[in-house]
Amino acid sequence: MKNKIENLQLRSKIANVEEAALLIKDGMTVAMGGYTSSGYPKVIANELAKRKMNGETFKVNLITGSNIGPIDTLFAKLDLVNRRVPMIESKDMAMLINKGKVNYIEQQMNKMPQLLHSNSFGKIDVAIIEALKITKEGNIVPTSSVGMIQHFVNLAESVIIEINVSQPEELEGMHDIYNVGFYPNRNPIPITSINERIGEPFIRVNPDKVQFIVKSEILDTTSKIAEPDDTSNLISSHLFNFLELETSKNKNKYLPPIQTGFGNLASAIVRSFEKSSFKDIEFFCGILQESNMELITKGKVKAASTGSIHMTPKVIDMLKQNKQIIKETVVLRNNDVTNNSEVINRFGLISLISGIEVDIYGNVNSSHIGGTRVVNGLGGGANFAQNAGLSIMLLPSETKDGDISTIVPMVTHHDIGEHDIDVVITENGVADLRGKSDVEKAYSIINNCANTYKEQLLDYFKRAVTKVGGHHPQLLSEVFSWHQRLKETGSMKQNQIFNNHY
Amino acid sequence: MKNKIENLQLRSKIANVEEAALLIKDGMTVAMGGYTSSGYPKVIANELAKRKMNGETFKVNLITGSNIGPIDTLFAKLDLVNRRVPMIESKDMAMLINKGKVNYIEQQMNKMPQLLHSNSFGKIDVAIIEALKITKEGNIVPTSSVGMIQHFVNLAESVIIEINVSQPEELEGMHDIYNVGFYPNRNPIPITSINERIGEPFIRVNPDKVQFIVKSEILDTTSKIAEPDDTSNLISSHLFNFLELETSKNKNKYLPPIQTGFGNLASAIVRSFEKSSFKDIEFFCGILQESNMELITKGKVKAASTGSIHMTPKVIDMLKQNKQIIKETVVLRNNDVTNNSEVINRFGLISLISGIEVDIYGNVNSSHIGGTRVVNGLGGGANFAQNAGLSIMLLPSETKDGDISTIVPMVTHHDIGEHDIDVVITENGVADLRGKSDVEKAYSIINNCANTYKEQLLDYFKRAVTKVGGHHPQLLSEVFSWHQRLKETGSMKQNQIFNNHY
């Protein structure tokens, strides 16, 4: 590991994991690197878990860049967390939060720099960062994500660095870390194209803060993305028809940069670009998954900006085999740029949004089932929708074998407002909401996007218009009856109730 | 009027109002200048009203920069509007919209440039602009607002200019119009301080599009701002205590630029700055009202950026008497800068937000009474809250002599999400929501901001926690019962129901 620490002063901080982890004590606030479950520190977390399993009684407050699923699951199973900021991706952690046993401070990524700067989460005792190496000058080269680690090392009292010798050295040079700053000491972010470099390829750290450097050989735990199903393929196909039509209005069929998310629908969409007539595709994402990386290696991508890379064995192999084209195409940026309103807005992104449910006006619930139980957290989605050039909500119209309609009279929790959603696409079709009044939006969504719930939605909406009216007709007494029915009968379908009555 | 049109080619377009207004025919889409009911065109609108009163049958689609109240009221009374974009401020127009007689495409100001660019509202037939003068080169100097007039003259087939000879000539030179553009032809907006000039002091227009230039002598209809009442003064006093505390953490007690709104609460706040210890105040607003202008003339303001000026007789007098300090301090900008996420975010604004109701988690309804009847429209508020450095929601905790609690279990319409509200202030106190979990937010808002409804809110919330729980406890079956009760009994108070039962 020594040759990964080029700075001699810092080389003296090498320690074993047990010793380093002792820095973390009950009640402390720990900030961990990692972003979208990529490039997060592992060995100190494992050591903390070991201590807890061995009977030590302690809990920490945990702040991360965004979700770091495997750590959340580990810590949740051992009841290691007191307060959690700003996003999770773990059924076990969600369960504890929903039981009221972990205080979850759910927050949007774009709001985090200001909130950290205002000391909103209290003092950060220890920052733990995964690094590829430390340069001669003592700067930290991150691994497969950047996120908010610059803020964490700036604000924390102590820093522990995990040098991960298993992360591919090809990652070096891919990072671009830009310090946005705060008014009155703030300038325009000088970025005008997707993979332009505006910062430095490393994080700066005060060497006196670095208490310990430990060795890690553990790769990220990566989730397997399921193959796209028929519904995903249909949604993707509607999206491409829409994009073909939309870009045909532009000069040279110009396609703005695309923001894709994570999972099998995102994968289906990215794979469809290969077969499409679109060339010189640009991505501006929080994470590049296997499908994005494949498209890059095939030369279909002009430029890609990302907050992280999903480091599956296949992606690691691509990084080694296709080093040149990947390094020419991809820039790994910090959260302050990847989730910045200024940058999102400037690039006029096509933002692809997913969620739990959408209502007849286009409001989106992307975080809370039944309005109460959090799944992951709203993350960056709302900010992308608010600032994108074109925001497209994609979701299957029904789930649970048709017992749940994802199109409802009113969403039970609001993450993204109707005025920030331009288009809704389901497997049934496309509702283009731009330039429509609220009543026109409702008819467009119901008629184009719903399937077996179409009549039930029309029945609700027509009664809302007739009985209450207004610019935004809603029957407040009935607006959540679909969710109540689901709870009571196992289905949102009205005939289920009739069946129960007969 | 001739000397106000320095360009000789355009001087030949002078026409009388009747002739010019004939350009506007049934079914056309008309874009009118004006912003926050300031600097809107008047004489063509009056002529259209006259035609309608004389029996001509016609309607237009009306697009404006934001609200232009007096025109909306005039047009609503005469049933002159078919479709209305993007914001109103008129009880009469709201009534037509809520009856379903006008199709209202409510939209946020920051989304408008992209939507106009994508042709989302169809072709614009005629743009009508109020101007102070036309320069030798044929450029238009606007009057007391800018808004979206550059887009309107760019996109419209024909342009009519109203030269308003009654608007004070001191306005010349105060404008700064910057063309933001669209990716891939877009650069960072090069603004780094509040009253920095980055554009041109006029609008460019294709002279061939200008069909008619007419004379106007009519001043803006300005609304009288009521004197602050006790509640406004209490809210303002809590705000200043909070700002004192907040700025005491900063070097030199630095106060970020303030975004204030319109009305008597905004007035009370601005007036309080005079008595406060804050110096070198900066404003970044959609409108400067009398109180802001007074503070400027008193030398308390370092810089002010605005989309418009509320041109009351007193303000017109100030412009003439205090020309120098006002022109040094104030810059009148176009919507693309005044409502730009990039700029709002860069300045780390303290955004002061108002609304109809807030819920126990900090979600805000600023537009729809009872979730159905629109008042004005969400305007720019959500975008300010999303991008501000600190967003503060200010409202009285109760209205209608205590029959309405503005703090409710769930807002009936969502304009601003809980994660975009940092602080809630009522006449009762301050809830600082930063760094709090959802349950902690609820207790903070109820305990610090509510008054006579405190017990009723606590009763609801504790039952939600116990009965349903989750990260975001809500009783969906009961969540709008307060609004139902108001409708049925005239009050949200539970004892009203008990009284009815006994």
Image (spheres, coloured by chain):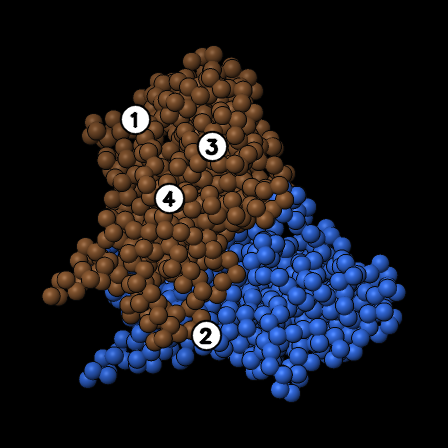
Chain colours: A blue, B brown
Q: Which residue is mark 4?
A: B234
Q: Label 1 is found on which chain of the structure?
A: B
> Residue A106 location, x and y as percent?
51, 65
Tell me the subunit letter for badge 2.
Answer: A
Q: What's the amino acid at mark 4? A: Leu
- Mark 3 burial class by Cα count in 10 Å: few <14, some 14-19, many 20+: some
Q: Residues within 10 Å of mark 4 (few under 14, many from 20)?
A: some
In the picture of the structure, the residue carrying the numbered disc 3 is B274
Q: Give the residue at mark 2.
A: A100
How much space separates mark 1 and mark 3, taking CA atoms?
40 Å
Q: Amino acid at mark 3?
A: Glu
**Residues tagged 3 and 4 counted as in contact (Cβ below 8 A):** no
Sooner in the amino-acid sequence: mark 4 or mark 1: 1
Query: What subunit carries mark 3?
Result: B
Image coordinates of residue B201 in percent, x first then y, are 55, 26
Q: Are marks 3 and 2 in contact (CB under 8 Å)?
A: no
The alpha-carbon separation of the residues under discs 2 and 4 comes to 35 Å
Q: Is residue A358 left or right of residue B493?
A: right
